[in-house]
Amino acid sequence: MSAADSISRDSAQWDAAVLANRGHLLQGWNWGAFKSEFGWDIERVAVPSGDRTATAQILFRSRGPVSVGYIPRGPALPDDDPEIARALIKRIDAVSRRRRALYTIFEVDRALPFDGTFREHMFVRGPERIQPARTVKVTLLPDEQLLAQMRQNTRYSVRLAIRRNVTVCRAGEAYGVDDFYRLLSDTSDRNKFGIHARGYYARFLDLFGDNAISIYAQSDGHLAAALIGARFGDEAIYMYGASSTEYRQHGAAFLLQYEAMRWARDNGCARYDLWGIPRDDPGSVSDTGDSIAGTKGDDWRGLFRFKTGFGGKIVDYPPSLERRYHRLGAFVARRMISDQRGDS
């Protein structure tokens, strides 16, 4: 077996190679295993070169004789080695053509190490990003410093929740996936966004195991908010969240994020990714201290205010790129991949 085959077939070797290039959780082995149970075929491509390895986890969705490829937050490769990047892309092209892909979308998490224009390297501008175009990443510090870097109103809300005896517990202590899903359904109805079936979130927690967390905030004896997160290397990510329409006051959601950050820090993470904010800064948002301004449909003003309040750094991702293998069938291909949007 070649070194490339060994890496692409072994979870520990794969994750080590991805993390060596500061790769994202969505390029990690468990994410591919997870998505393979929900309609995606997974191909893992590795290109070793000396003591370096470039990797790409490609998700394929098929319809009839054709497919589309999708590389979320990847590939994972060195920032200063265009040769290994070209070799990896050549392998991605070969796999995509074997899969009869109309095209493969690259949602890179940072710029590819090429000079010149992307068209010179046979890329075209990709579609609107499937994963969020911007996020907020919080540096994980000791408790007092973690609180100190928050905006005043956010810090107040965390402390208010503690004063008002909002309690936070892990899954299994009082609540579980059924409770999370009930709360998520409430949030979906209130804020007008789509969700997966219950089994999707249960399977995520099963597959990620000790690298995932499911925590719940209780206020006045009622479930107020819930959160699912995961860690990969030195970064943790807020993956899914929900809050009660009736009982979400008293800063429960703020305290929940603070506790998730503490969990991530205590498990060796240096950063906490709050996952998604609007591409552009929204207009003014009212701030009432212990509550969250409304977020509904495409109106993310409340979400923006909530997440940026934790004092992190706003990170902008590059536009998506596309390797096009067939000039026709664009509409079909877009429809095939669109149901991945908003997955996380």
Image (spheres, helix red, strand yellow):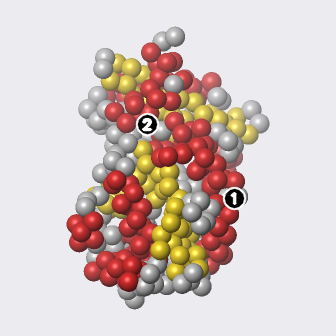
The amino acid sitting under disc 1 is Arg
Q: Nearer the viewer, residue 227 or 63?
A: 227
Q: Does residue 160 appear to the left or right of 4 in the view shown?
A: left
Q: Nearer the viewer, residue 92 or 150?
A: 150
Up-down: is 127 above or below 84?
Answer: below
Q: CA distance from mark 1 to mark 2?
A: 30 Å
Q: Residues within 10 Å of mark 1 (few under 14, many from 20)?
A: some
State how many labels appear: 2
Residue 231 placement (x, y as % from top left)? 43, 48
The residue at the point 30 percent across, 20 percent down is 51
Image quadrant where residue 94 sits: top right
The residue at the point 65 percent across, 67 percent down is 179
Disc 2 target residue: 75
Q: Does residue 158 appear to the left or right of 180 in the view shown?
A: left
Disc 1 target residue: 198
Helix, strand or loop at label 1? It is helix
